[in-house]
Amino acid sequence: MEAGERRIAADGDLLALSPKPVKTGAQPADSTDWVRRKNDIWMDLQGGNLVFGAEFSLMFLSLSLMTIAVGLTMTFSVFIDRGAWNWNPPLFMLVGNIFCTLPFGLVFHMNTNKAIKESPPVRLNRQKREIAIPHRVGGSEFKMPYWGDDFAVTAYIVFLVVVGGYGVNYMAGPWDGEGPNVFLNGVHWIAGVSSAILIPYIAVGLYLSKKSKPHLTYIYHPWEQIVAFIQKQQVTAPTILAEQTMLTLAVPDPDNLDSAKAAISINVGHETVGLAQWECLRAFMDEGPSACPDPRDYGTLADYKASCRLARQEKGMAGWLWKKVGDWFFQRYLARLITERRVRKLIPKTLPQQLREWSEPLPEIDWAQPSEELQALNAQLTAAYRRREAFNRMGPVSQWLSGERAKSGHITA
């Protein structure tokens, strides 16, 4: 394949963008928020909405505070009516949140961290004119009795049912003054037995499963030889038929032309958006960091503060107060702090040392330059775009340019 070539297949139409990553004439845009970090040397591409993950997990913290407040309100109302303070409702709400609500937020938080670690970024190095795509090698099949993705969930549900049963009995029945002791003794017994069995089992399982997983490495490939294409695909399911358009970067496998050593894709929604996203990458490599958009600051604390100041100026009092309620419920301030920490510390910690060394700056004299062939193609295509030619309708670049040369008399039939 070559840039400009189209293929129509059963699994969807395909438009090739590279090898020879030529200009497409599109305006560079990071419409999918694929650019995670950027400097004068390299640019990281990584998908995923980290702010949403942080807000969703922190929502359970807000729910916990709300239910504890409900328990205190119930106790206070009883105190006002009957003159007797009862600590049972707030204590029950507190224990219920510790064992029920808060763990869900913790699970989502840990799963987001896990997704970040298991989805490392693709890195473009403009000084070396190379691309680094993550690749996992090694690993072995992991087998352990009763171990599975739903083991921890099942064990936790059983634990909640037993502890919840004790809690309901404690709250509902008269215990003749022995309720607290019976409840606490039961919880202590369950916690002791569960800890003695589950903690060693889970610790051994996590260690062995981690040891059996493939380890992360990177494949380094010349930028001008990368395979890139936009493909429209149909997604079918028993109850749905939909289309998605993917921008894919792949390192070809010389031993098998129909497969890749490593690849990464992102859903761009439409071919036009895919061309703008691709042009964002190409402009960074060929023209420099200033030629492509900076990473979106949506997940930063500074952007959140700016949005709050803007909302205070533009919204009425009711709208502004409603926004502050939503900000508190989703803990957006704290969510931005967590997101910034993930971008600055967690993501770099997951990268192998080899990639860090590969990303070190080079003396300007050692910088790789675009090939003469690519520069000549881009010059001719720039002139074509000024004549309002469209990259996605002109066919393979080599054939189109040959035709132009023939018309201008540079080559003869």
Image (tube, rainbow, N blue to C red):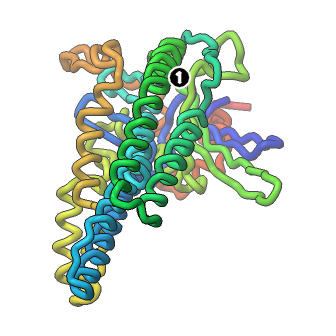
Question: Image check: 66 left or right of 256?
Answer: left
Q: Quadrant of residue 335?
A: bottom left
What residue is drawn where x is 20% and y is 55%?
Answer: 301
Q: Amino acid at mark 1?
A: Gln
Q: Quadrant of residue 195?
A: top left
**Farthest-out residue, front:** 176
Res. 195 in view: yes
Q: Secondary structure at mark 1?
A: helix
Please name whichever residue, 33 or 373, is drawn nearer the observer in this view of the structure: 33
Question: Image check: 9 left or right of 148?
Answer: right
Q: How far from the left and from the top, in percent, is residue 252?
A: 61, 20
What residue is drawn where x is 32% and y is 73%?
Answer: 70
Question: Image check: 380 left or right of 295?
Answer: right
**Placement of the N terminus among the 4 image quadrants:** top right
What residue is drawn where x is 43% and y is 52%?
Answer: 100
Location of mark 1 (residue): 225
Q: Quadrant of residue 305?
A: bottom left
Q: How far from the left and from the top, in percent, is residue 369?
A: 34, 22
Q: How far from the left and from the top, in percent, is residue 111?
A: 44, 40
